[in-house]
Image (tube, grey):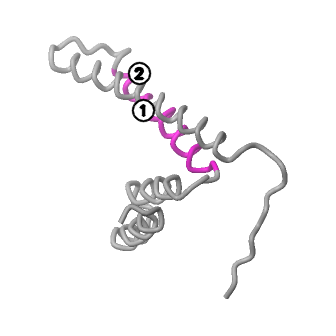
C-alpha cells in the first residue's frame, strides 16, 4: 500500500506554530510549578491562605489548556509526535501502556535515537 503525500495549503509554518504553542506550555508549566512550590511551603509552615489554596486548585486548568492546545498543533517532526504519544500515555488515553511504549519506541527509532 502506498501512502499519498498530502500537501497543505500555504499557511503558517508548522515549526513556528509548534514552537509558539510549546513556549506557552512551558510558561504554564513554570507558573504551575511556582504555585505548587508556594502552596507546599505554605502548607509546611502553616501559613496556607484560602486565596493561595484557591489559586493552587485553579492552576491546573491553564496548564491543561496549554497542554491540549499543543497537542492540537500539527507535529512538525518525530520528536513532536513522540511528545503527543507520551501525553496520551501519561493521561491514560492510550489503549494500554505496552502499545504506547511500542509506538514511542518506533518514533525514537525512526528519529535515529536507537
Specify whether residue 47 is painted magenta.
no
Q: Percent x, y for residue 76?
A: 61, 52
Reading the image, the residue beneath label 2 is 55
The answer to which of 75 and 57 lies nearer the viewer is 75
Q: Secondary structure at mark 1?
A: helix
Quadrant where the N terminus is found in the figure: bottom right
Percent from the top left, x then y, of residue 32?
A: 39, 28
Residue at x-position 53% and y-position 33%: 23
Q: Quadrant of residue 9?
A: bottom right
Would residue 17 appear left or right of 45 to someone viewing this image? right
**Camera-side residue of 65 and 73:** 73
Q: Position of residue 103 (x, y in %)?
A: 43, 70
The Cα atoms of the two marked residues, 2 and 1, are separated by 15 Å
Farthest-out residue, left: 45
The image position of residue 97, as x and y in percent, is 34, 68
- Which residue does the image show at 23% across and 16% down from the upper left? 42
Magenta-colored stretch includes residue 68: yes
Q: Is residue 56 above or below residue 73?
A: above
Q: Which residues are magenta?
A: 53-73
Q: Which residue is mark 1?
A: 29
Residue at (22, 11) in percent of width and height: 47
Say the numbered circle drawn on residue 13.
Answer: none
Amino acid at each position: 500500500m502506498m501512502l499519498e503525500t498530502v500537501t497543505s495549503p500555504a499557511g503558517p509554518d508548522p515549526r513556528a506554530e509548534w514552537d509558539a504553542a510549546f513556549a506557552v506550555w512551558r510558561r504554564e508549566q513554570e507558573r504551575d510549578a511556582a504555585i505548587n512550590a508556594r502552596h507546599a511551603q505554605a502548607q509546611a509552615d502553616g501559613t496556607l491562605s484560602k486565596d493561595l489554596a484557591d489559586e493552587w486548585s485553579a492552576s491546573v486548568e491553564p496548564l491543561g489548556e496549554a497542554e491540549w492546545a499543543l497537542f492540537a498543533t500539527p507535529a512538525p517532526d518525530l520528536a513532536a509526535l513522540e511528545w503527543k504519544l507520551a501525553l496520551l500515555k501519561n493521561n491514560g488515553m492510550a489503549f494500554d501502556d505496552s502499545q504506547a511504549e511500542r509506538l514511542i519506541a518506533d518514533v525514537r527509532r525512526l528519529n535515529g535515537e536507537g
